[in-house]
Image (cartoon, helix red, strand yellow):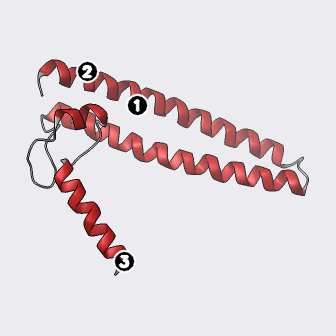
Amino acid sequence: MDKKQLAAIGEQLLTKRKELLAEVSETIGVLNQSQDKEELADFTDQSTLEFNRGFHLQMKERERKLLIKVEQALEKIKDGTFGICEKCENPIGDKRLEARPVVTMCIECKTEQEKQEKRNNFS
């Protein structure tokens, strides 16, 4: 991967980090609003509020995990290890990195990991 491609991916990651941080702030705001409304809610409204709270917390957890991956990818760009498979230490394909810059394994290692997980789940 050349410097121009790496810089473009770095910018993409920085943008994604900014979006995720904004989404986390928004989610916290929604949760705070639902707590304020909770005191006034009847039983049916309470159920809806609990469902919505659970949904927002689930989304927040996904955002948190993705944010960690984005931060790790940015750190790898800094230390020069971005685009190297964490399992076999071979380069990860440029197209794979462009499509999903937070990946940590080449397609071969990821495919093998998924096959192993399937075998373990069916055992």
| Crowding near the residue tagged with mark 2, few <14, some 14–19, many ≥20 C-alpha atoms within 10 Å | few
The quadrant of the picture occupied by the N terminus is top left
Q: Earlier in the sequence, mark 2 or mark 1?
A: 2
- Does residue 90 appear left or right of residue 26 in this picture? left
Q: Earlier in the sequence, mark 3 or mark 2?
A: 2
The quadrant of the picture occupied by the C terminus is bottom left
The residue wearing badge 2 is 8
Q: In the picture shown, does residue 13 fall above or below 114? A: above
The residue wearing badge 1 is 17
Residue 93 position, x and y percent, is: 16, 38
Q: Quadrant of residue 88?
A: bottom left
- CB under 8 Å between callouts 1 and 3? no
User: In the image, what residue type sits under mark 3?
Assistant: Phe
The residue wearing badge 3 is 122
Q: Earlier in the sequence, mark 1 or mark 3?
A: 1
Disc 3 is placed on an element classified as helix
Circle nearer the viewer, 2 or 1: 2
> Residue at 36% across / 43% down in the picture?
68
Q: State how far apart marks 2 and 1 are (Cα).
A: 14 Å
Residue 59 position, x and y percent, is: 55, 46
Q: Residue furthest top?
A: 4
> Residue at 17% across / 53% down in the picture?
108
Q: In the picture shown, does residue 105 fall above or below 20? A: below
Q: Nearer the viewer, residue 99 or 77?
A: 99
